[in-house]
Amino acid sequence: MHENQIGINTEMGDGKIILHLDMDSFYASVEIRDNPSLSGRPVVVGADPMHGTGRGVVSTCSYEARAYGLHSGMPISQAYHLCPHAVFIRPRMALYAAVSSRIMQILKSMTPEIEQVSIDEAYCDLTGDQSYVRASSHAEDIKQVIREQEGLTCSVGLGPSRIYAKMASEQQKPDGCVIIPPEDLLSFLHPLPVGKIPGIGKRSVAVLASIGILTVGDIARCDIQILQDLFGSHAVRLSEIARGLDREGLRTSGKRKSISREHTFLKDSLSPDEILSSLHEMVLSVCHELERRDSYSRTIGLRIRDSGFITKTRSVTLIQPTREVRIIENAIDTLFAEMWDMTPVRLIGIRVSGLVHHDPVQRTLFDF
Ligand SMILES: [Mg+2]
């Protein structure tokens, strides 16, 4: 099966739909679920308060405790003074870890790609849903399955990059679902206080306030030079985030879906020997990379750009995934013979995609 394409492959880069999911007061909610008599009471999971003399901090507290001003990271002695009648519970990490891994399992079964970032937080790529309407009903389904199977609520946010999804999920806790499609991004972002941008801490908030920058919109309108003086190399990204231009997807490195190599000749080449030997070098390098990732490729692609900058791309899909040099070389040789029209070659590139992790040899037993 051939996929004929003339022109440069453009990976879908701008239409991402990212979901951020954050369990609500996770440790406290697990404790309340397992002991319903705690329901409706201020519950604090953390260090022993020792009647106000304890050391250590609050890990998580229920929303009822938050009403007294308690929050994660607060010294436990201070929490005790603010709310002495709260129920103070030592953390049971093994229990929370088991609940967490079941929740991540649910996410893996319901979405194509997830990036877990903490015990109770993950990003999922819902780009495949193709619209925010479908993605939001997908998100509601995820919330419902977690509620039914684990008896716990979470807050989710949907947006065109991971940072916007996170900012969305934090807007409406607990049990929230906030959808920010690209067309609503600026009206969502600009009124927010600068501290709502993840990574902007108290110190940065104070520095920005001192020059009159209070909202995300103020950052968007701020001269980049001023931001550079304050934030150095982070200024450009911060400005992009504020202007709604960030499009960062999941950080699942090592799970990239393709491997590519390319080579530009110093002088446009007309020699099939030179071109093929350069391609074979790239095949070797790609096969090493496949081995390093313990992956096999199903689709082998070749790109040829001629001296007039016309680029042709063509790929072949194999019956079974491979990382054998000989098989990939054969595929490339065949593609090259089909594609090359004897015009001088400026650049060549190969790309293997359709990566899988299983061992195809085992599958052969069933295939033939
Ligand atoms: Mg949480």
Image (tube, rainbow, N blue to C red):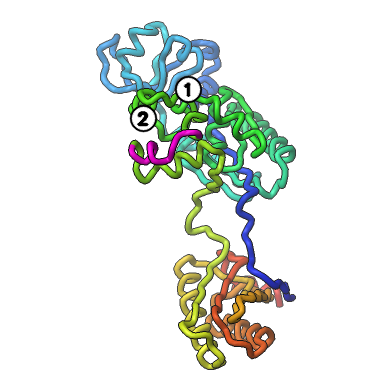
Q: Secondary structure at mark 2?
A: helix
Residue 204 point in image, percent of width and height: 36, 30
Magenta-highlighted residues: 221-229
Residue 323 point in image, percent of width and height: 54, 75
- Any mark on residue 207, and which? none
Does residue 193 appear in this view? yes
- Identify which residue is drawn at 44% across, 27% down: 195
Residue 85 point in image, percent of width and height: 41, 6
Marks 2 and 1 sit apart, C-alpha to C-alpha, by 31 Å
Relative depth, front residue between 14 and 356: 14
Left or right: 207 as drawn, with respect to 303: left
Q: Quadrant of the N terminus?
A: bottom right
Report if the beta carbon of the residue with label 2 is closer than 8 angstroms to ligand 1. Answer: no
Relative depth, front residue between 323 and 260: 260
- Identify which residue is drawn at 40% across, 23% down: 72
Q: Which residue is mark 1?
A: 28
Relative depth, front residue between 311 and 4: 311
Q: Which residue is mark 2?
A: 204
Left or right: 238 as drawn, with respect to 148: left
- 45, above or below 343, in the image: above
Report if the beta carbon of the residue with label 1 is closer than 8 angstroms to ligand 1. Answer: no
Does residue 5 belong to the magenta stretch? no
Q: Exactly how many numbered labels are in the figure?
A: 2
Q: Residues within 10 Å of mark 1 (few under 14, many from 20)?
A: many
Amino acid bearing label 1: Ala
Amino acid bearing label 2: Ser
Q: Main secondary structure of the magenta part?
A: helix
* Disc on the earlier residue, 2 or 1: 1
Q: Mark 2 or mark 1: which is in front? A: 2
